[in-house]
Amino acid sequence: MGSRRNNLNNVALKIIKVMKTKIAALTILTAVSNSLLGFLEFDRGQIFLETTFQGTHDNNITGNANGESDLILLLDPTLIYERKSGKGSLSASAGVSFLRYNDFDQFDSENIHADFNLDFPVTQGSRLSGGIDLGYTERTEVDEFVNDLIVSENTNLNLNGQYQIRPRVSVTGRIGYNDRATDQFSDVTDEFATVGLLIDEIWQDVGVTIDYRKRNVTSSGDFGTERDDKDDSISLGVVGQILPEHLFPKLDAFASFSFQTVETERDGVRSKQDVIGYNGGISWEARPTTSLELTFNRDVNVSVLDESIESSIISFGIQQQFSQLVEGGINIYFRDSDFLDSDRTDERLGIGANLQAQLGRNWTAGARISYEEGDSTRELSNYDRLTTSIFTSFRF
């Protein structure tokens, strides 16, 4: 018991030492927050420092059949700016996540994260609406296809817009860029552009969508050989109150099916195949304090192993407001993945729960638990994983 306590003390001392010497950004964030005296109005916006402390016990830190357990401590100070004006909103944040492992300190890391989000219009009656999302995140996490703990740098840019050309007809568009870079495996870049039509109230509160997508996913070939997968797809979908309103009031849904032609290139050889994709979700406010959500998706992606993977995932969640100060939820998911370049197939089932309480105006605390199990033709991918966490957050 004394040895365990000494280990925890050593971990805490490591965090304090890193906070003092390793990252100058943390000192800057703290100084700024103090100068702001906790909470500041700036150009009709609000700026504050949110700091999260979390302890997690993970019985399989590397996500494979040989994984070990460990206690992981997290400190995450984040500077946040938020502003709302009319129907528009602006938010930005930047911070550093300090991860410390009690036994496997070779996985200790300091990960920077930053993001910028803008939603418009600001004025009422505008025909143009949309949003911009820009983010950069360093992550230390388990990759379920690699079955190991990897460090990655993730950069993403997403633009979406909608312009109303007639009272019930709008032109929609989206452009996306996502890059995932790792030292141990291949870098993967995903670029896509979508253009389409949204026609509202075709039948009562139900609308339809027609979209065309052009997508290109490439890998650097550091692990195997370079991938260059291109796909053209046309999708047809419905949006709105697709179930009877008298049985399911306050329901919002979207469902689409796409016809994709995927062209892959590997070792200079190109091949084509047709894939049926789907994407959608249903959210329903069953009661003022209870909401349910069902999502599903099927698509082809490229992993850091330089392999194309066709994955299908379905998830279901319940969120419950127990009181004005306490809320929680449960989520269940199932994922089926087929590796198109080999005979490997993976199946994963997971369930998680969370509970969070507001203990003060600027103080929250809670707990999370999740359990996953898998079945795979790859022996290393047959593993179970149980994680339990407690956390608390303060806003200054």
Image: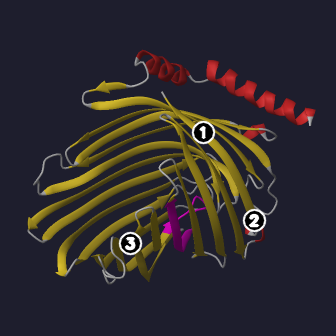
Q: Looking at the picture, how far across and down is residue 47, in whole percent?
A: 37, 29
Q: Which mark is residue 384?
A: 2
| Mark toward the viewer: 2 or 1 | 1
Q: Which label number is shown at residue 92?
A: none
CA gap between label 3 and label 1 equals 44 Å
**Picture quadrant where residue 4 is located:** top right
Q: Nearer the viewer, residue 176 or 333?
A: 333
x and y percent of residue 143 in the render? 63, 57
Can residue 287 be seen at all in this image of the molecule?
yes
Question: Furthest-front residue in view?
Answer: 323
Position of 213 compared to 103: left or right?
left
The residue at 74%/24% (across/down) is 13
Q: Which mark is residue 231?
A: 3
Q: Amino acid at mark 3?
A: Asp
Question: Can you say which quadrant of the picture contains the N terminus?
Answer: top right
**355 in the magenta segment:** no
Is disc 2 placed on a helix, strand or loop? strand
Residue 392: image tag: 1
- Whole-angstrom CA distance, mark 2 to mark 1, is 27 Å
Task: Please check the rendered image and state whether residue 316 is part of the magenta-colored stretch, yes or no.
Answer: yes
Q: Amino acid at mark 1?
A: Thr
Q: Residue furthest left?
A: 166
Question: Residue lying farthest right?
Answer: 2
> Residue shown at 46%/51% (left/top)?
179
Element at badge 1? strand
* Colouring mode (rainbow / by chain / secondary structure / one colour): secondary structure
Left or right: 321 in relation to 334: left
**Most prominent secondary structure in the magenta stretch?**
strand
> Tag 1: Cα neighbours inside 10 Å, few (<14), some, or many (≥20)?
some
The residue segment tinted magenta is 301-320
Query: Where 396 sits versus 313, above or below?
Result: above
